[in-house]
Image (cartoon, coloured by chain):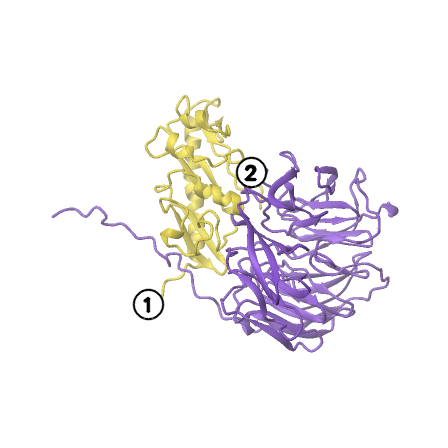
Chain colours: A yellow, B purple
Amino acid sequence: MKKDKGYNRRDFINNGVRITLGLTVVGTGAFALTQSTTGKDYVWQIDPFKCTQCGRCATECVKATSAVKCVHAYDLCGYCDLCGGYFKPGAKLETGAENQLCPTAAIQRKFIEEPYFEYIIDEELCIGCAKCVKGCSAFGNGSFQLQIRHDLCLNCNQCSIASTCPSDAISRVPADKPYIIKGDFTSGEEG
Amino acid sequence: MVKDPVNGFITTQPGLDNRGEHAVVADIDIGAYYESMGTLVHELEETWPRFRGEHFDNISRSKVPLIEAFPSDGPEIKWKVDLGEGHAGAAIYKGAVYVLDYDEEERADLLRCFSLEDGEELWRRGYYINLKRNHGMSRTVPAVTEDYIVTIGPRSHVMCVRRQDGDFIWGLNVEKEYNSEIPLWYTGQCPLIHEGKAIIATGGTSLIVAVDLESGQILWETPNTQHWQMSHSSVMPYEFGGVKMYVYSAYGGVCGVAADGENAGEILWETSAWNHQVVAPSPVCMPDGKILLTAGYGAGSMVLQLKKAGNQFDLDILQEFTPKEGLACEQQTPVVFDGHLLGILPKDAGPLRNQLVCVHPDDFTKVIWSSGQTRRFGLGPYMIADNKLFIVSDDGTLTIARPSTREYIELDSYRVLEGHDAWGPLAVADGYLVMRDSKSMVCLDMAADRQ
């Protein structure tokens, strides 16, 4: 019988590099945006410390699939077997669809080594519903969070999500600092 | 040919994470590590001998008056020691502090003994074991008597040593001997010493076992016919209807096990109505037969009413509610004060999230007071000593409040520690309070007369 191929350190490191690169690309895009505009330009962004995961981001964006996506602040993640952002409460700790919180299976769970699991967001599938963010905030470290992706956002004059956000979590931020990520990733501090 | 609309779809099924098989349980030479550095010069009088203290209620009976306000530069820190990452709290016995630490350099679980007054380390006893960080490593409080100390490590290695000098007496590899599954984030159960026996909830092939302290001989084993698993909850002694029992909230259910007599170790009552994935708080057993069971991860709480009918016990479920509806705790066990229950609600408790609340003894969903929107805490410990409530926030801030059944009365607060995840239980004796964050432990001089 053929054994499943394990998820080894090399895969883990490669994934980390890939995620970092992904963020770098986004960051570069934002930088390019900044360069093509003046220093006074602003873009819409969600403050993860104010967000109450109400779910409106998934439905109120003018884009057919919301420009709001879940992003993962890896430096905050506990890499737990039981992830409150991945599993429904009380679910079996297996990848079966019936156990997953995400309605579009946009989170990949990968075994690294005992006792660690990595959780990767597939933004193509993510609809910004915040179910995972809510679970992660309630039972975990809060490493899942919503952000407006500026490669998708139309930067409307009036953000339709912001106008309905019950916690006033969406506001304009300087275009040269377009993301607000929890943890030490964006603050420059080492964890 | 008609195009298959689901062509290319992938079914989301178990096994996609490539989780491997569990590793083979390692043989560990329990007790093999020993280091002696000194002897206790000045013995003190008081004790905080185990998890939740002498009376299992997290209330100190010490007569030493404690401060109710901090000096402007904070409480006097008598000593501070770096620890391996974790949440293990201390026990105190007549001037000695005992903590089960994980030494990340030695890669060993070590029971460390310190002098309470000056923090001098006196001896270490333990065993080598490779552990990876999993929201910390250590999380249990030793059980201490005049002659013995029993510890249980992250992978459920039980160790019994002589209290005075740390001489090794016996060890028990629970995972190996009982085919137990170690709970997520390692073992959180604190061992119990009761009437000359070590009481350990093993899960696995037996649910609970009693071990003779001197010989290490197994005295009785409770059959685990329903295959319940070890939780983070600790076994609580309880006497109801003239019967001594041990109450245990396992993964799978909750039960009462006879503590003595001919039927010692037999299950007196049980129910699987309380069955949750993560259970950390211990059962709160009230004198009138009410038992509060609570857990995090959305579980909420259940209140059982135990009744004795002849030689049998019956159970009624009085209440079952979510964290938004009443008292629920994720990590710490509520404290009973003047018949009322005090506890800090979890993050999924709605508007009262992270607030300290007091609930009515007749209805645990009836919140009498809460600490307010501007006074939220976290997963840290809380206890009562000298009629003062000591509460630790995640960031190491120590708050003093006046326990009351009418309102939240805060006296003072001060950030004592600089770290985070200050979740280890508190210990108080002789006017000294021992607290920790994830990487260090401090001893505070809280005695009012010594200020």
Closest to the observer: A68 or A186? A68
Q: Is residue B114 above or below residue B414?
A: below
Q: Chain of mark 1?
A: A
- Find residue B121 and report its horizontal and vertical position in percent: 77, 62
Q: Is residue A86 above or below residue A155?
A: below
Is A44 placed left or right of B357 in the picture?
A: left
Q: Nearer the viewer, mark 2 or mark 1?
A: 1
Which residue does the numbered mark 2 point to in the structure image?
A: A187
- Find residue B124 and report its horizontal and vertical position in percent: 72, 66
SS of the residue at dot 2?
Answer: loop
Alpha carbons under labels 2 and 1: distance apart: 45 Å
Q: Residue A126, labelled with which disc? A: none
Looking at this view, name the residue that lies furthest to the left: B1
Q: Hey, what amino acid is under mark 2?
A: Ser
Q: Hey, what amino acid is under mark 1?
A: Lys
**Looking at the image, which residue is at 55% across and 69% down?**
B175
**Looking at the image, which residue is at 61% across and 71% down?**
B265
- Find residue B390 and report its horizontal and vertical position in percent: 73, 46
Closest to the observer: A108 or B5? B5
Query: Are discs 2 and 1 less than 8 Å apart at CB?
Result: no
Which residue does the numbered mark 1 point to in the structure image?
A: A2
Is B110 placed left or right of B46 in the picture?
A: left
| Crowd tier of the residue under label 2, counting other residues whose Cα lies within 10 Å: few below 14, some 14–19, many 20 or above | few
Mark closer to the chain start, 2 or 1: 1
Q: Chain of mark 2?
A: A
SS of the residue at dot 1?
Answer: loop
- Asked if residue B101 shows in the view, the reply is yes
Looking at this view, name the residue that lies furthest to the right: B449
- Asked if residue A142 shows in the view, the reply is no
- Find residue A46 and report its horizontal and vertical position in percent: 48, 32
Quadrant containing the C terminus of chain B in the rendered view = top right
**Looking at the image, which residue is at 34% across and 55% down?**
B13
